[in-house]
Image: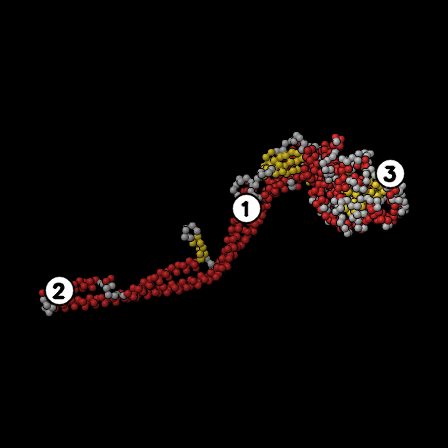
Amino acid sequence: MTDKMGAMDPTSFAAITGGNALANTVRSAELAPELSLISHYWRIIKRRKWTVIGSVAIALVLGLVLSMLATRQYTATSTVEIQRENAKILNVEGVRSQVTSADQEFYQTQYGLLKSRRLAELVVVNLKLTRDPQFRDAFGLAPMGGTALSTKIVGNAAGTTAEIEQARAILLSRVTVSPVRLSRLVDIGFTSPDPVLSAKIANAWSEAFIQSNIQRGFDETGFARKFLEDRLESTRQKLEESERLSVDYAARQRIVAVEVQGPNGTSTESKSLNEEGLASLTAELNKAIADRMSAQASLSAGFKSGSSDVGISGASSVLRQRRAEVSAEYQKLLVQFEPGYPAARALKEQLNQLDRSIASEERFIQSSASRELNAAYAAAAGRESRLRAAVGEQTARLLAEKRAGIQYNIYKREVDTNRQLYDALLQRYKEIGVAGGANRTNVSIVDKADIPTAPSKPNIPFNLFIALIGGTMIGFALTVIWEQIDVAVSDPTDVQRALGLPVLGVIPQSDSEGEDIPTMLLDRKSAISEAYLSLRTTIAFTTTHGIPATIAVTSTRPGEGKSTTAYALARLIASSGKKTLLVDCDMRSPSVHLLVQAPNTAGLSNALSGQGEIGSMFIAGPEKGLSILPAGPMPPSAAELLASERLPWLLNELLTTYGFDHIVLDSPPVIGLADALIVSSRAEATIYVIEAHATRVNQVLSALQRLASVDSHLIGVALTKFRSEKSAFTYDYGYGYGSDRRKSG
């Protein structure tokens, strides 16, 4: 059965099968699955489409009327070029920093300056707009006249402060600054009712911007020069003071510095006299040490054997020469004679005498050389000692000077720092003076504004487009607001979403004037007949044994089609070959006998009160197997009569004794009466009828809660008087039996 029921809500289906399931169904209404937000609003729009269409139509008409009645406005546009930096006439830097291609802040600043109040005021003053009749007439200003004495006068030609502020506000509200994308060009537009005035103000705006830019540059340069002049004066005074302190301290400490040429011949370095003297003494000491070491080496060597040839005198040379001659003669005699030969002995004796003379002469020479070396060594050592003492004294003086020179260097560094700062400020002061006179402006006019020949406003297509958008938005807003106010059940999705109940059938509203439901049910191809047939078929799948034996049909309030639905359902069940009884349980306001145009002389009230034979009260229906039990005369208390044990007995008697297969109970409405609760509790199943587009959700929920309190077995909802044009739900009957097919069939 689950497969046959298909889209039936599982929670609602549980309400059919027993227990107090209807209470669970009512509580689950708040927990029923919501449709997607988009589809929900789409259904609302379709249901309220005429509200949206009406809002759009009204907005379009209003937009067209306002556009036609609006004052024609003319826009004139001038174009300027804004460079990132001024033209480089001189290669010196001005006050303003140079920007890069990535510096977007520069252009944003320029756009802001183009819409500044100062620039607007400059245009007002330059054009004397407060005294211009053309300007005053164009914007509906009062004629020129006197003002209060307390008003500050800016100038006789320019106007009062109040007039200038008024004109400035008008200009700022109508000027447009539009940068041309991917370029340095900017369009400056002005809109007014007068085309000539628009062109004049647009051109004046460009010229005033250039004038303001130049004046701002001069103001910045003048401020910078004034600032640098003050800084130069204070820096000069600091430099003089630091130089004075440095010289005074050097004089007190006797620090004298000399300029020494550097090794490359171009740079110089400053050295004190003590440093110069120490360097000279150190060089002399090194030389004296070398001389002393040389004399000491010579003294140590002396006149060693074989190394004293340089010390031989002239006499020693004569003696040595004579000895050589005598020795030669002696050797010559020894060739012929023995050594003892007298002549040989005489020569030998002569040789010995010469040797003694030579030795004596050499001893004399060595003694003289030794005295000379000792004297030279002593002189070198003495000079070295004196120089060492002088170097020590000079070093002590230099160290003392260095200790005193720490403060002196501090003074010198302060002097150097002040001098560098003074030179830099002086150089910058000169550069700004030159740059201020050379670098003019980075703004130039590319195109001047021409007098417009056609109005720019109103733009009727654009206004209609805006009206279309606005009307659509208003229509959507009204639709949502109206939907929140109107909480009536409009289509089957509302039943499933808000009530959590399955829809057993959707009965369309009849479009035929003067044709009643019983007559339309005779046409089996009509939309209503098809809808009720679908309802009967759906009910057959709600239990395991088919159509319930006793079915109560109720509604929230009267007039929702409850009785018609009960009549149609009983008639269609009977047409399927089942013996069916339609009972009018609404004894307060009976209507079933009117559907079959029968009298209501005896009926349910008589049967429940035990008056008369039940079988004699039946009325034959239009279908074979269909019988109708009218409500009968209205009793004093219908609720008490229905609440008696006679109603269950009567239903059982009708099913068993009289052999009816199905009984359809036309129950009274739920709201305000207890009758429907009693009838519904006695029936095997209850069908709830809701009039589409009329019955409110909160009313239905209240009624369902009452039914749940008596353990009524509610199987679903029949939605009646449904109009598809008022709903987003598209109703279609199977293969579409339309009027054309009925005519042709």
Asked whether 334 or 503 is in front, the reply is 503
Asked whether 610 or 742 is in front, the reply is 610
Asked if marks 2 and 1 touch (Cβ < 8 Å), the reply is no
State the residue at coordinates (63%, 42%): 112
Q: Residues within 10 Å of mark 2 (few under 14, many from 20)?
A: some
Badge 1 element: helix
Instruction: State the image coordinates of residue 115 (x, y, percent, origin top left).
Output: 65, 40
Q: Cα distance, mark 2 to mark 3?
A: 202 Å
Q: Cα distance, mark 3 to mark 1?
A: 119 Å
Query: Which comes before the other along the chain, label 3 or label 1?
Result: 1
Query: Which comes before the other along the chain, label 2 or label 3?
Result: 2
Badge 3 element: loop
Asked whether 209 or 362 is in front, the reply is 209
Residue 184 seen in the figure: no
Q: Tell which tag, 2 or 1, sits nearer the viewer.
A: 2
Badge 2 element: helix
Q: Which residue is mark 1?
A: 429
Three-letter amino acid code at the position of disc 2: Gln
**Which labelled disc corresponds to residue 598?**
3
Q: Tell which tag, 3 or 1, sits nearer the viewer.
A: 3
Three-letter amino acid code at the position of disc 3: Ala
352 to 16, vertically: above or below: below
Three-letter amino acid code at the position of disc 1: Tyr
